[in-house]
Amino acid sequence: MRYKCMTELNSVLEKALSFERINDEELLCLLEEKEKGQDIIRIAGIKNQKINSNTVSFVVNRNINFTNICSLNCRFCGYKRTKKSKDAFLLDYDKILEKISEGKKIGIDEICVTGGINPELKPDYYFSLIKTARDNFPDLHIHAFSPQEIYELSKATNKSYKDVILKLVDMGLNSMPGTAAEILAKETRSKICPEKINTDVWVEIIKTAHKSGVKTSATILFGHIESNIDIVYHLSLIRQIQDETNGFTEFITLPFISYKTSLRKKVDSTLMQDKIFKFYAILRLYLDNFKNIQTSWPKIGIPAALKSLECGVNDFGGTLMEENITKSAGGEFGEYLPEDEIVSLIKKSGKFPLRRDTLYNYIYEKTYENRY
């Protein structure tokens, strides 16, 4: 894929604002624009207002990281440990149920279950984890296991991706995170995570999930060694999948936290915050088949997350309660925000908070104005 930016910026912005589809060459123009970032942000804010009015959604959830033992060696990761590491861990089901019970005390609607690729875990650990959670918490939304885990389970059981996903659904799975995507441009992907599933496998598993009735998020790891051309490839592929399946619930940018990773010497993290606001805006303009663009307060901090609400973002993410992956890479913005605080922050930013579930069904839509 090779593009040259030959398009005048104002015409691209006018096109986006009139809800005409921006093509990949025009996306590259937006990414390469150096002087008019504020114009891009302003138009994205107007477009988001037309799509989502003045609302900002969030979910009351908790993350459960079940193991940090991993056989992969991704260069962007500070979370991975070996079995012999002093701080290695693997949670048993009792501990997982305890964590869910802690979440229930704050009224969670969802658990998000993620972990390392632990070579000693048998497939039954994954299937039984879901069944145990479902049996004990029948009304809980279980959002679990990326395409990487589906691949590992398929390989270990000699079953198709579809069969693995449907078995997990039978155990109680509701939806999947669209992580393990990182960057889908193949050459750069091979440099930062050569042992992970390749782009074609990731796409196949995501499409299989969607066609099996399992919704997923969509993600990108942003701000490492990727080029603008890589970003165009990634976003174009995501948009094509959404055109085909309509199976993505939201798009989540995962800004790269470099401090405790092997890629840290190749990245100037001081530039990240300036870049991220423009990037959020570009997502709103280009991803015309996504209603929901999510910010990441654990990665960029609360003030920046609030500022992103003016850049085309309409979702604040979740309460989380636990976020070991960002923390392990050097993240310093915390792991938990109570519901009341999220609501207060959104209202102070001039927006109207909407509590949602994982699939963006709104809860208590009309009550916050009276409660706060």
Image (cartoon, rainbow, N blue to C red):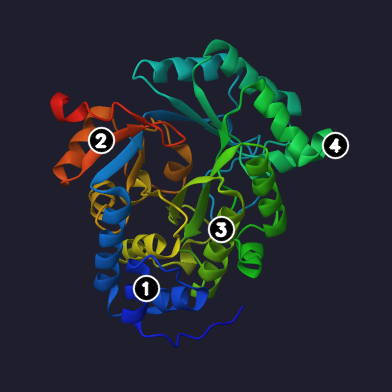
Label 3–label 4 contact, CB within 8 A: no
**Crowd rating for badge 4 (residues with CA inside 10 Å; few <14, some 14–19, many 20+):** few
From where the camera sits, is residue 173 visible?
yes
Residue 151 location (% of width, % of height):
73, 43
Residue 77 location (% of width, % of height):
54, 50
What amino acid is at disc 1?
Lys
* Secondary structure category for the residue under label 3: helix
What amino acid is at disc 3?
Ile
Q: Residue at x 82, y 33 (%)?
A: 157
Q: Which mark is residue 15?
A: 1
The alpha-carbon separation of the residues under discs 2 and 4 comes to: 44 Å
Which quadrant does the N terminus fall into? Answer: bottom right
Residue 360 location (% of width, % of height):
42, 37
The alpha-carbon separation of the residues under discs 1 and 4 comes to: 48 Å
* Secondary structure category for the residue under label 1: helix
Residue at numbered disc 4: 158
Label 1–label 3 contact, CB within 8 A: no
Label 3–label 2 contact, CB within 8 A: no
Q: Residue at x 30, y 60 (%)?
A: 47
Q: Nearer the viewer, mark 1 or mark 2?
A: 1
Nearer-the-camera pick, 336 or 145: 145
* Secondary structure category for the residue under label 2: helix
Residue 363 location (% of width, % of height):
34, 27
Residue at numbered disc 3: 238
Q: Residue at x 70, y 34 (%)?
A: 165
The alpha-carbon separation of the residues under discs 1 and 3 comes to: 20 Å
